[in-house]
Image (cartoon, grey):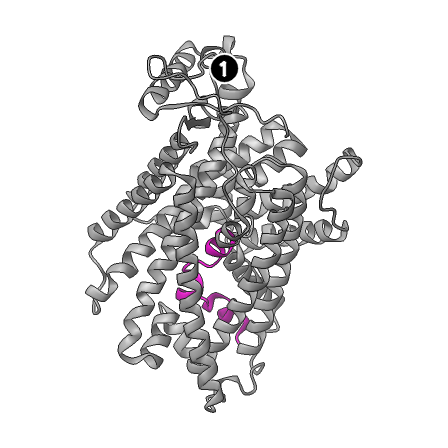
Amino acid sequence: MSAHEGSRILSAPPGLTEPPKESMQLKKEISLLNGVSLIVGNMIGSGIFVSPKGVLIYSASYGLSLVIWAVGGLFSVVGALCYAELGTTITKSGASYAYILESFGGFVAFIRLWTSLLIIEPTSQAVIAITFANYLVQPLFPTCEPPYAASRLIAAACLCLLTFINSAYVKWGTRVQDVFTYAKVAALLVIIVTGIAKLCKGYTANLESSFQGSSTDPGDIALALYSALFSYSGWDTLNFVTEEIKNPERNLPLAIAISMPIVTVIYILTNVAYYAVLDVSAILASDAVAVTFADRTLGVMSWTIPIAVALSCYGGLNASIIAASRLFFVGSREGHLPDALSMIHIQRFTPIPALIFNCVMSLIYLTVEDVFQLINYYSFSYWFFMGLSTAGQIYLRWKEPDRPRPLKLSLFFPVVFCLCAVFLVAVPLYSDTVNSLIGISIALSGVPVYFLGVYLPESKRPPIITRMLRYLTYSTQFSCYCVLTEADKSQ
């Protein structure tokens, strides 16, 4: 996919300036607090505000739903611990892409990258941006749906603004993440405190006999757990930026250890607050549970919750942009995407081409009217590759037993996670077969691309591809004031 012979000789845009003596690599600017904000900010999206009812639909009772939320949190802790070991053992950015590349080679890693590029990252970012726009303008249209064009334009502006912020300086992006993570946690604390106050005043009727009517169907319980686990997704966010973390051997696992209990406790207590105020029928009938909760409890201040949902989406989108751009950056550096995407600005040390590419892909998906439907296509692929990267952890224990591992878990953790990943792959195949098969087809569409762009030597590729990639490299260097990064000898 790269044009190495034609582009690696370039060290700086000709005629612009001499490259600085400082090594051209992404800088380690992400602190422990920034790491916690990235993980918490990406895990707590709009879901806990808008639609936590997925678990309740299948569990059919408040008591069982809370148990499932707790089990989902525990499982996510296991997965996050596995990624903490992987991140301190394989100190490359890129999360599961980097781990699969190290364990199983380039082809499988490319399919993981291709799936993210084509569907997972741009679709999820487009959906988050649209949700942000809808809730931002909702107070202006209290009795009807916001105009379609207005929502899409605001969503596009949001994507472009966050791309600019993260292109300017890494610190700008992490500060935005910190602020909006604090805002969304504060909003959830308002909901939690309000719910606890109601419980203290005797509003316990909804929680009495809380297990009555619980579903006993294994299939329903499996779907309820699947819904909970999807809400917990995002705990791998920090692994996408491992190379930019200060003291990653310490701060990566510590950030995970701090973040996971915070999110799990917040999720459980937020649901308890909802259940104290709203009965089952009210929750299932609501399109935005937090808004319904606020209407019943916050009075004239109920307008703050739609704004809080918008802020939550904004922070989650920022974290997703940071993670996705690093994924494409690392994929380019490994030769799986055009060289232009592994360039960084010679003064700001930000991956501007990868950020712009990510933004363009998301803007394209904003033009798809039913973009929410596309989310259904990647559940299978998402959990398959998460499980595969953890299987690689087990494989590397056997293949490279003497490899330095600053954090070394019992094999119990990756084995349990892999078994659960098999379950998470099977659930969408069983419950949503058609969409899962479409998702598999999207992943397999990367096979001919890998053959033409990566596997074939450059001398055997169609000449037009080589010429286009070389032109892209030159033009990106001039327009973005970027150069190719140097290899990190410590990795």
Question: What residue sits 55% from the left and 63% below the top?
Answer: 262
Front position in the image: 86 or 13: 13
Q: Main secondary structure of the magenta part?
A: helix
Q: Determine the residue located farthest toward the front in the rendered image.
A: 21
Question: What residue sits 57% from the left and 55% below the top?
Answer: 427
Front position in the image: 252 or 17: 17
Question: Where is residue 271 shown, x and y percent of the image?
Answer: 49, 73
Q: Determine the residue located farthest toward the bottom in the rendered image.
A: 202
Question: Where is residue 30 shown, x and y percent of the image?
Answer: 51, 44
Determine whether the residue tagged by mark 1 lies in a helix, strand or loop. Answer: helix
**Is 48 a magenta residue?**
yes
Q: Amino acid at mark 1?
A: His
Q: Is residue 136 left or right of residue 339?
A: left
Residue 123 appears in the picture as rendered: no
Viewport quadrant of the C terminus = top right
Residue at mark 1: 4
**Is 360 a magenta residue?**
no
Question: What residue sits 64% from the left and 47% below the top?
Answer: 250
Question: Where is residue 449 shown, x and y percent of the image?
Answer: 48, 25
Vertical side of 458 occupied by 300: above or below: below
Q: Report the number of numbered marks.
A: 1
Question: What residue sits 57% from the left and 78% below the top?
Answer: 63
Residue 15 appears in the picture as rendered: yes
Question: Where is residue 269 shown, x and y percent of the image?
Answer: 52, 73
- Asked which quadrant contains residue 346, the reply is top left
Which residues lie in the magenta part? 38-60
Vertical side of 178 occupied by 329: above or below: above
Front position in the image: 203 or 28: 28
Vertical side of 183 occupied by 455: above or below: above
